[in-house]
Amino acid sequence: MRYVRYQKGLDQPKFGWILNDLVGELEGTPFGDYRRKEAETSLSSVRLLAPVLPGKIIGVEVNFQNPGLESAGGFPEIPSIYLKPPSSVIGTRQTIFLPPQSQLVEHEIHLAVVIGRSGRWIAPDRVNDYIFGYTIATDITARDLQDTDRSSGRARAFDTFLPLGPWIETDLDIIDILMTCRVKNELRQMASTREMIFSIPQVVAFISSIMTLNTGDIILAGSPSGAGPLIPGDLVQSTIEGIGDLFNPVVREKAR
């Protein structure tokens, strides 16, 4: 099943479900009790929003195999994680703003795990009981600020720095799916989830050993090599097999 958040005209945002090229309204939310109305509204006639408004967002920094890691001393022994604020979230077709404080902003594609119910100390073999579904994330980082700050806190936290969407897919086999990121149709990143160093169950179990994961939280499961710079006028297309495409234009924000 595919679940969306959408807006038609000036109406209030709603949760919905997708059938082919139609969207139907949900009475309630997909994370609790709801009733599905008929899918009778054309998907092209609504604006898709970020499919979830997470309470927290946890990312994994290095989680894909590449020769550079091996030559630098091997793969990490445990996941390295970071946090992003919910205010960084936008939806598909919404604009990524390059902040005036940074001259080097880069993209990363991630498979985003959507948590379906709260849990702490989740065992790897129980992880699927806590996952609601998956969506696409384009994680944005002001790389020069990350270098000068020696921390990714500010560099990853700007508004619009986490496009999510276009919807949540609840029926997805994540063992071996292709992830690609293109900028102005130039292929920048490509890898399969089979190349992950830590599996999704390992990542979720590790993070839940540190903090409680709540319904609607997002985990960014790692990005393959090839992340590159963005400039005004770019269009970022992040694609994950079995989910779809996430598109976001890039604009320079004016200093105030």
Image (tube, grey):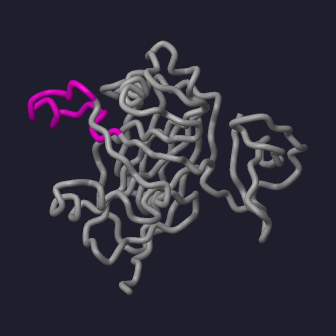
Using the rendered image of the protein, determine whether residue 57 is visible from the camera's viewpoint: yes
Left or right: 61 as drawn, with respect to 92: left
Taking the view exactly as shown, the residue that stands out farthest to the top is: 125
Left or right: 92 as drawn, with respect to 156: right
Asked if 221 appears above or below 158 in the picture, the reply is: above
Asked if 102 appears above or below 161 in the picture, the reply is: below
Q: Give coordinates of residue 164: x percent, y percent.
A: 53, 51
Q: Residue 190 versus residue 119: which sits nearer the camera?
A: 119
Q: What secondary structure characterizes most of the magenta part?
A: loop
Q: Residue at x 82, y 55 (%)?
A: 42
Q: Give coordinates of residue 187: x percent, y percent.
A: 38, 51
Q: Which residues are magenta?
A: 60-78
Asked if 72 appears above or below 40 in the picture, the reply is: above
Q: Quadrant of the C terminus?
A: bottom left
- Residue 114 picture quarter: top right
Using the rendered image of the protein, determine whether residue 194 is visible from the camera's viewpoint: no
Q: Residue at x 85, y 54 (%)?
A: 41
Taking the view exactly as shown, the residue that stands out farthest to the bottom is: 256
- Residue 222 picture quarter: top left
Q: Is residue 65 magenta?
A: yes
Q: Give coordinates of residue 37: x percent, y percent.
A: 89, 43
Q: Give coordinates of residue 183: x percent, y percent.
A: 41, 59
